[in-house]
Amino acid sequence: MSILEETGARPTLTIRVLNAIERAGNRLPDPVSLFILAIIGVILYSHYLASAGAFAVNPATGETVKAISLLEPAQIRRLFVEAPQIFASFPPLGVVLVIIIGVGLAEWAGLFNAALRGLVKAVPSHLLTFTLVFAGVQSSIASDAGYVVLVPLAAVVFASVGRHPVAGMSAAFAGVAGGFAANLSITTGDALLSGLTQAGAQLIDEDYTVALTANWYFMAAIVPVYALIGTIICDRIVEPRLDAGPAWVRIAPPTDDPHAMRRERLGLRLAGLAFLLVIGLTVFLAFEPGSPLRSDAGGFDPLFRGMVAIMFLVFLACGLAYGIGAGTIRSDREAVELAGKGVGEISGYIVLAFFAAIFVALFSWSNMGVLMAIAGAEALKSAGFESMPVLLLIAVILVAMGTDLLIGSASAKWAILAPVIVPMLMLLGVAPEVTQAAYRVGDSTTNMITPFMSYFPLILVIARKYRPDFGIDSMIALMLPYTVAFFIGSGAFFVAWYLLGLPFGPGVESVYRLG
C-alpha cells in the first residue's frame, strides 16, 4: 500500500497530482539500475556516433574531438583491465570513506544526538524557532541525523512550551531538508559533489580540480538566509494556520534519566575540549609560512587541501572524547566497532559509487560529454545566452528542483547531470564550482514536499501523533510555503552573490577562462 493510500485522504486535486507523481516515480528503477541502464546506453550511443563520424572542435583547446565507440576491442579490453582502478580512483569515494570513519564514530557514540538536544534546550523561547531551523540546517554535518533526532525533538520542545508541535516539527524539517545544501562547516556532501563536478570539468580541462571547499564561502553565508526565512514562515504563516485548525493531541513529554544526563553533559564538555585541541593543532601547523599546512610562499592551499584529514581528526577526537565521558565507549574495540558502523551505513553508496564511476569513465572515454557540451554551448550561444549566464544558472536550479521530485539522492542526480551541465557551462565561461552551487540550491529546495524523499513517511508519522487526521495533502500544504520561500530567498541570494562576483570558496572565481 502506498503512502497516499495509508493516509485515507480524499482524492482532491492535490492528491490526484501526487498520485500521478507517485505512479511515475514507482516506475523508476533503483539508482544503481539507472546507472546500469545509462552505461548500456552510453556504449550503444557511442558506437552510433562513431559510426556516423561525429566530431567537434573544442574551443578550450582548439583540438578536434571525435566520437569513440566503446564497442571497439581496445575500449572493451580497457574496461576489463582498468575497472578496479576506475573504482578506486573515483574522486568522491576516498574522501567520503575517510570522513565517514570519524563521522560514524561520533554519530554512533551519541555526540550528534546530545549536541542537538543541548542546543535546543539551551536557547530562550523567543529564539526557539530560529534555533530549530538553524540546527536543522547545521545537522547536515551528521548526514541524516537531523531527520531522526531533531525533527521529533522539535515537536516535543514546541509542545513543552505550549506551542503547536506540528509547527515545531515543520520548522526543523524545513531546516534539515530545505537547508540541506548549506552549512557553516564542510560536510560529506561537499566531498560527494565536488568529486563529480571535477570529473565533469575534466572533460574540458583535464587538469581542472574542484576543491572540497569549492562552495564553502557561499554555503556558509546562506545559512542565516535559510534560518531567517524558515523562522518567518513558521511564526507568521504555518503556526497561525495550525492554531486556527483542529486542536492537537497532548502527549506527556518523556522523563529524563538524571544519571544519563550527567554523563551526557560530561561527554559534551570533553568533546568541546577535544574540538579546541584539534583546532589549536591546526592553527599551529598553519601558523607561519613553511609550516606543514602553509606553503613556503605563505599560501593556505595546503590547509584547504588538507581539509579532509582535518575533518576526520575533528570528528574522531570529538567522538572519542564524548563516548568516553558519556560512557558509550568503554574500550578501543568498541571505538573501532562504532567507526565500522559508520562505514557500514554507506554500503549502499559504495555500490552506487562503483557503477557511477564506470559510467563517468565510459562517458569520458567515448568523448560524448565533450561533444554534447560543445553542441549545447553552441546552441545557447546562437540563442544569445552567452551574454546572460545567470539565466543558465537559474535554469540549473530549476532542473535540480524538478529532478529532486522523483530522485531523492543528490549525488545520484549530479552523477548523471554533471558530465553534461558542467562542461557545457564551462564553454560559456561559467566556473564548475558555480554550477555546482546552483545545483545544490535547487536540489535542497523541493526535498520537503516530495513523497519520494526517504524520510517523508517518518515525518508524516510524527505529525499524526499530534494530529491523527494529518494526511499527505496536509503535509504538502504544511511545507509548501517553506519551499516557495526558500526558492525565492535562496535563488535571489545566489543570483546576487554571482552578480556581485563574490568568491564561492577559497580561490574560486565565478568565471572560467577558456584556454
Image (tube, rainbow, N blue to C red):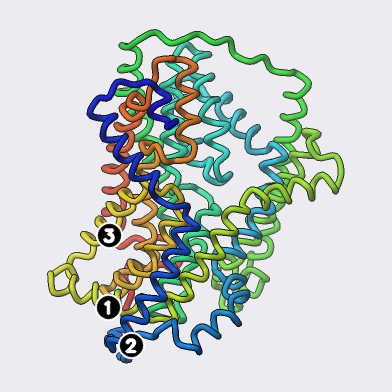
User: What's the residue type where badge 3 is placed?
Assistant: Leu
- Residue found 26% across the figure and 43% down from its top: 488
Spot occupied by residue 139 in the image (x, y as percentages of width and height)? 53, 40
Q: Quadrant of the C terminus?
A: bottom left
Residue 55 is at least partly visible in this image: no
- Residue found 47% across the figure and 38% down from its top: 176
Tell me the element at label 3.
Answer: helix
Disc 1: which residue: 374
Return the disc, 1 or 3, that comes first in the chain's sequence. Answer: 1
Return the disc, 3 or 2, that comes first in the chain's sequence. Answer: 2
User: What's the residue type where badge 1 is placed?
Assistant: Ile
Q: Which mark is residue 393?
A: 3
Within 10 Å of disc 2 (Cα), the crowding (few <14, some 14-19, many 20+) is some
Return the disc, 1 or 2, that comes first in the chain's sequence. Answer: 2
Q: Nearer the viewer, residue 190 or 395?
A: 395
- Residue found 30% across the figure and 23% down from its top: 236
Which image quadrant is residue 117 in? top right
Q: CA distance from mark 1 to mark 2?
A: 10 Å
Spot occupied by residue 484 in the image (x, y as percentages of width and height)? 28, 37
- The answer to whether the residue labelled 1 contacts the one labelled 2, judged by CB atoms less than 8 Å apart, is yes
User: What's the residue type where badge 2 is placed?
Assistant: Val
Q: Nearer the viewer, residue 258 or 82?
A: 82
